[in-house]
Image: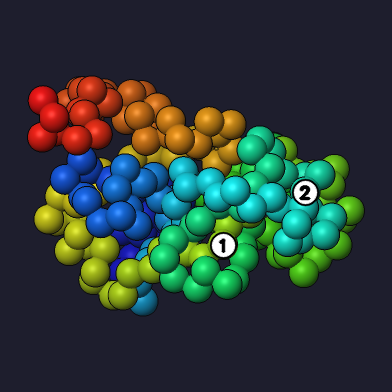
Amino acid sequence: MTAALSHTGRLLVATPLLTDPNFARAVVLLLDHDAQGALGVVLNRPTPVEVASVLDGWADLTGQPPVVFQGGPVALDSALAIAVVPGEPGHGEPMGWRRVHGAIGLVDLEAPPEVLAGALGALRVFAGYAGWSPGQLEAELGEGAWHLVDCEPGDVSDPEPERLWRSVLRRQRGPLAMLTTYPEDPSLN
């Protein structure tokens, strides 16, 4: 897969027809997408678990809500973090942070939090991730399970993650914006 075909750094927004409970009305940030498959995290699934209860030192850097998010159905016993670092790419990236796309990057949770404290604009911690084998995501996109849209840094740290699905669709042009009116359960209409 060439870099031009990679969807790394873009959002997958579940179509209303995707009813798998892991992904219904999900917004997934693709952290990696290449010939080996794809990996991402669901941005809008907060859990009741506070970051402070599972990761010492990171809670003070976490935005609102300060909880762990369920990143997907795979490896729920592992954690990864995403942070936004303000500024232009290539201008001294902080140690312990690896750029994924634009201002969004992965945080090394093994690094001391105080090393990153002054550099991070927003941090979110995820338990687990979503993964696709080679060709699987392309097939799901071809079947119409997902809308592929651009990510904005604020999507990673939206203080109202439960509304993210609608807010991402609302900013799209044309028919995608109309999906925000799609009912949770169309059988009740």
Amino acid type, label 2: Ala
Give how far across and how far down residue 170 sits, in percent.
Answer: 33, 24
Q: Read off the residue under disc 1.
A: 127
Between residues 106 and 5, which one lies in front from this camera angle? 106
Q: Quadrant of residue 134?
A: bottom left
Q: Residue at x 84, y 55 (%)?
A: 57
The answer, for residue 154, to whether it is visible in the render is no
* Residue appearing at x 40%, y 27% in the figure: 167
Q: Position of residue 70 (x, y in %)?
A: 51, 56
The circle drawn on residue 59 is 2
> Is residue 100 shown left or right of residue 151?
right
Residue for point 29% across, 48% down: 24
Where residue 102 appears, x then y in whole percent? 55, 44
Q: Is residue 142 above or below residue 128?
A: above
Crowd class of label 2 (few under 14; some 14 to 19; many from 20; radius 10 Å): many
Q: Residues within 10 Å of mark 1 (few under 14, many from 20)?
A: many
Which of these two is toward me, 97 or 167? 167
Count of numbered tags: 2
User: With respect to residue 55, does 155 lie above or below?
Assistant: above
Report the front residue among 22 and 34.
22
Q: Nearer the viewer, residue 107 or 23?
A: 23
- Residue 6 horizontal side relative to residue 137, left or right: right
User: Is label 1 in a helix, a strand or a loop?
Assistant: strand
Q: Where is residue 119, by image quadrant?
A: top right
Measure how far apart labels 1 and 2 are at the Cα level.
15 Å
User: Where the C terminus falls, by quadrant?
Assistant: top left
Q: Of the two numbered discs 1 and 2 on the same chain, state the one appearing first in sequence.
A: 2
Residue 86 on image: x %, y %: 69, 37
Q: Amino acid at mark 1?
A: Ala
Judge whether 149 appears above or below 81 on screen.
above
